[in-house]
Amino acid sequence: MQHCENENDMVVRYASCDATPESVGYDPERLSFIHRHVQSLIDEKKIWSGSYCLWKNGKVFADAAIGTLARPWMGNTLFQPDTLFELQSVGKVFTALAILKLMEDGKLYLDQPVKDWIPEFDEGDFREIKILHLLTHTSGICALEGAYPQDERNWQDQMDPKDPEHTWLSAVVKTGLHAKPGTLWLYSVVGYQILGEIIKRASGMAAEEFIKQSIFLPCEMRDIHWRKDATKAQLRRYNIANETDLAMAAKADRSGIQEMAAPTYPTWPGIPDTAGGQMSTCREMMQLAEMLLRGGTYRGQRVLGKTVLEFLWTNLIGDDVRDLTFGRNAGIRYGAGMPIYSAEYDREQALSEGTIYHEGAGTCVFLVDRREDFAAMFQTSFRKEFDWDFRAVKGLATIIWSGLK
């Protein structure tokens, strides 16, 4: 059940919740501040919309949306709490959890050389790359385009576009490494696609299907999906947020709604789609958070064991490893697939020490706070793609955490 309320000349759309903020120890005044903060960014034309879902002590106590889609879509103009938006790189969390699932089932281990699964890596410094290095972005493999401009590398230039499935891994090796494995933190998309290939080989099924069967379904996440698998009903609930979405919507006007089922980033046949890109709602991501905060169990269904989940909250990289992406030169703590918040290294936001989180193209963030038994998912749809604004991401996370009593 959803309803709207007017708050100081802004309209906030709410979904029903399990509890009130007061009953779980959260200051309701900070929710009003969140709404005003988001509305101010909408008024400045920085973002189209903002939505969030908050969970504490086993209950969702806030699930709301403000703002509009970038254009009317299938009769919709307003962003609703159940509007589906793209998780972007937040989807890497599922890839990491799938690796941990295979680990607890005895299929692989984190210090295992990648060459055991990928024979192409049995060459030079690639022999030293471990599964752990891929999980923590310390493998030295090609960084995200633009993230490390002093040594830009594009592995796709080395691939045969007519036969990507059989040439992409050797193309990565031909492109070489930025640094020796374990020495630098450099955010890598292709590293998580390689993890997808390992999942495929270790599980005997497509990585996407393994993630669905081992994570989505046990957590009762039935709305989340890759665009290629979308139903027409789901496509009608999509967020139209930026230039890419607008171009796809224009195609859909001409050729039909299925045009919206295309990925918004480059994909290749035969290469695992495990670096992100799923469509979800904030509410469903709280089901994942509940599983993580309940020792790997969701509503009585075992998903993962609590022992492997400890790798999410354990810093798995050395204290001397520096984050050099996007012009930074800072320390970083990183677990199996997510950064671990530390005030020592991160003063852009104020969270509970040890909170794990992941951003998706700067437009959405998933955060899990074990100390406070608290989790959040929010999205802020920027009007211009990649027009990142601190206030809509790090600033909003700080405001959300400020409501904890």
Image (spheres, rainbow, N blue to C red):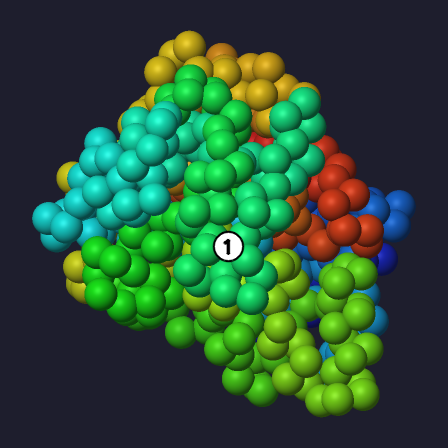
Image quadrant where residue 78 sits: bottom right
Looking at the figure, which quarter contains the N terminus? bottom right
Decide: few, some or many residues near mark 1? Use Cα within 10 Å; few <14, some 14-19, many ≥20. Answer: many
Q: Residue at x 74, y 40 (%)?
A: 388
Q: Residue at x 37, y 54 (%)?
A: 196
Q: Is residue 81 visible?
A: no
The vertical placement of 177 against 109, above or below, is: above
Q: Residue at x 44, y 39 (%)?
A: 173
Residue situated in front as seen by the camera: 60 or 103:
103
Residue situated in front as seen by the camera: 149 or 72:
149
The vertical placement of 5 against 368, above or below, is: below
The vertical placement of 336 against 274, above or below, is: above
Residue situated in front as seen by the camera: 259 or 365:
259
Q: Is residue 321 visible?
A: yes
Residue situated in front as seen by the camera: 366 or 183:
183
**Which secondary structure, mark 1?**
loop
Q: Amino acid at mark 1?
A: Gly
Image quadrant where residue 111 sits: top left
Q: Position of residue 232 (x, y in %)?
A: 58, 87
Q: Position of residue 102 (x, y in %)?
A: 20, 52
Residue 304 is left or right of residue 317, and the answer is left
Q: Residue at x 65, y 32 (%)?
A: 152
Q: Position of residue 208 (x, y in %)?
A: 38, 65
Residue located beneath label 1 in the image: 276
Q: Residue furthest left?
A: 106
* Tag count: 1
Q: Position of residue 61 (x, y in %)?
A: 48, 55
The vertical placement of 223 against 194, above or below, is: below
Image quadrant where residue 126 sits: top left
Residue 74 is left or right of residue 215, and the answer is right
Q: Residue furthest top?
A: 320
